[in-house]
Image (cartoon, rainbow, N blue to C red):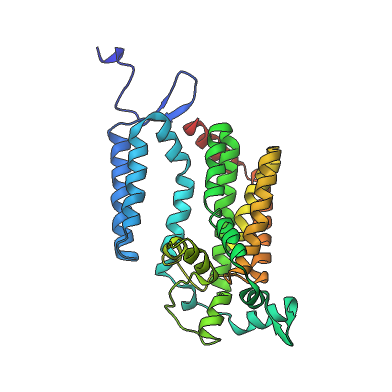
Amino acid sequence: MGQNIPFRLSKKIKVDNTGHHSVTVNPKSILTVSLLSIGYLLISYFLIGYNSSELVLVAIFNTLFYLSAVTRKFILGFSIFIVYWIIFDYMKAFPNYHYTAVHIADLYNFEKHIFGIHDNGKLLTPNEYWRIHGTTFIDVVTGLFYLCWIPVPLGFAAFLFFKNKRQFLYFSLTFVLVNLLGFVIYYTFPAAPPWYVQYYGFHFTPLTAGNVAGLAKFDAYFHAGIFKSIYTKGSNVFAAMPSLHSSYPVIVLYYGIKNRYKIASIFFAIVMLGIWFTAVYASHHYVLDVLAGITTATVGISLFNLLMNKVKWLQMSINKYEQVIL
């Protein structure tokens, strides 16, 4: 009788009636997901301490994994982003200023030298200029733009997941690669953001907490603590160079244009310019940081395309992963 049962618990991967390989719920997959969930919580606890967001992440993953075949494929596809988030979160345990001196005054002075603005007889950095000449309208608009830095990439990724699995994987892996390049720079060139100079001067103070800086005006206008809640969870204050906030919209726009989503690409371009300006306006990044973020995205995109053309095992791995989430 067992041979007539179409669903066998002894297999983790099965081939469905379309020829695609899919992950099934069975003892082996249940054990794997359970061990990964428990292991993640234990490592997180001993490495960076307990945080409710860790439980939320585990709950979301497990719920979507067991809910249905569609949600299971969805969360397995988005595991690429989960890996990125875990790496980013664990950076808290290894502050970059433990390994290399933080650049504060030299970066500030170079920014002023290259992009300085003369105002009332003084030479100011663009951050300092906008801190003086900002308006409530700009505070609100720039705040809205900066709220897009994660929802837009993730929203576009979700769209690609259901529209084109191969492009979803390309986009996701490019996103992670760009972040990894940024992380390498964080540890080789620790850099203080503009707001740090405004509040602390050029003296290095370890364990400095994250700060909303100019985005506090947005929170105040709406009587909300939106950005405050975000920046209190930052992994490292001294990771302003490159501005990955500025990298993300470049990746999104590239894949929007590549896939010929014309209207969406116009929207992506507007968001990109808005995020670039906000990064400087809100004193979270120098213009130099923004340019470094754009460069990092460009290098990451080019490197990924090169690897896809040259490295066969990467192509094979992506092909297999695509079959799992189809």
In the displayed structure, 252 sits above or below 75; it is: below
Residue 313 shows in this picture:
no
Q: Position of residue 24 (x, y in %)?
A: 36, 30
Picture quarter containing residue 223?
bottom left
In percent of width and height, residue 124 lies at: 69, 81
Q: Farthest residue toward the left?
A: 1
Q: Which of 159/29 is in front?
A: 159
Image quarter of residue 180? bottom right
Of residue 178 and residue 255, the one placed in the foreground of this image is 255
- Where, quadrant-wise, is the N terminus in this rendering? top left
Q: Is residue 3 left or right of residue 13?
A: left
For image coordinates 31% across by 52% down, the residue present is 55
Q: Residue at x 55, y 60 (%)?
A: 143
Q: Residue at horizontal 28%, vertical 57%?
A: 42
Q: Which percent across, then down, holds residue 234?
A: 45, 66
Q: Position of residue 85 (x, y in %)?
A: 45, 55
Q: Judge whether residue 132 can be spotted in this image.
A: yes
Residue 123 vs residue 196, the one in the foreground: 123
Left/right placement of residue 160 relative to residue 33 reads right
Determine whether 188 is above or below 122 in the image: above
